Image: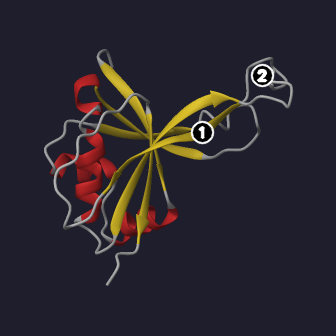
Amino acid sequence: MEGQTELFVLASPEVEDILADNGINLEDLLKREGCAVKEHKGQDPAKLGSGEKDVAIIILASAALVAALTPILSKAIQSLTYKDVVVYETVLVPVEDSAGNVVRDSSGEPKMQWIRRSKLLESTRDKGQQEIKIKALGFEIEITNTAA
């Protein structure tokens, strides 16, 4: 998988339901938008060593495509629903105790957690183009109700 970047997608339960209701997964949705990606499931890195078995959606894409995925994902998911789609940049960081020391698991590896760093895009049907810059390897996607 040389030249491929792993991108963890943390979809809200509502986004997962919309995809399931439409009989499509993120890989197929992105391919429909012309993106060359592969999807697989894997262990959420924030849960490694915790005994929890949370499964994460992992998208493999070229580094060049990663920067374009935020608006593409937002547009593609919004095409399936009448609600706004909000995308957040998330980063994987070590858990720290109250003294600022990294918390480690029983094998000595740092415990990790996803932190929402910034709101990247809130899609609405009336807003103009927005410039998006991505510096992390995780997205959090949510659906919000539109104002009537």
Q: Which of 26 and 118 is in front in this view?
A: 118
Q: Mark 1 points at which residue?
A: 114
Q: What residue type is labelled 2?
A: Val
CA neighbours of label 2 inside 10 A, class few (<14), some (14 to 19), many (20+): some
Count of marks overlaid on the render: 2
The disc label shown at residue 85, or none: none
Q: Residue 57: x percent and y percent?
A: 46, 44
CA neighbours of label 1 inside 10 A, class few (<14), some (14 to 19), many (20+): many
Q: In this view, does 126 lie to the left or right of 117?
A: left
Q: Name the residue under label 2.
A: 102
Q: Residue 25: x percent and y percent?
A: 33, 55
| Residue at (73% x, 22% y) in the render | 110
Q: Which colour scheme is used?
A: secondary structure
| Residue at (33% x, 19% y) in the render | 1
Q: Is residue 40 left or right of residue 128?
A: right
For the residues marked 2 and 1, what is the alpha-carbon distance in whole angstroms?
15 Å
Q: Check the image and report above or below for 146 versus 135.
A: below
Q: Residue 92: x percent and y percent?
A: 57, 31
Can you tell which quarter of the image residue 148 is in?
Answer: bottom left
Q: Residue 14: x percent and y percent?
A: 46, 67
| Residue at (25% x, 53% y) in the render | 29
Disc on the earlier residue, 2 or 1? 2
Q: Is residue 72 left or right of residue 23?
A: left
Q: In this view, does 117 lie to the left or right of 40?
A: right
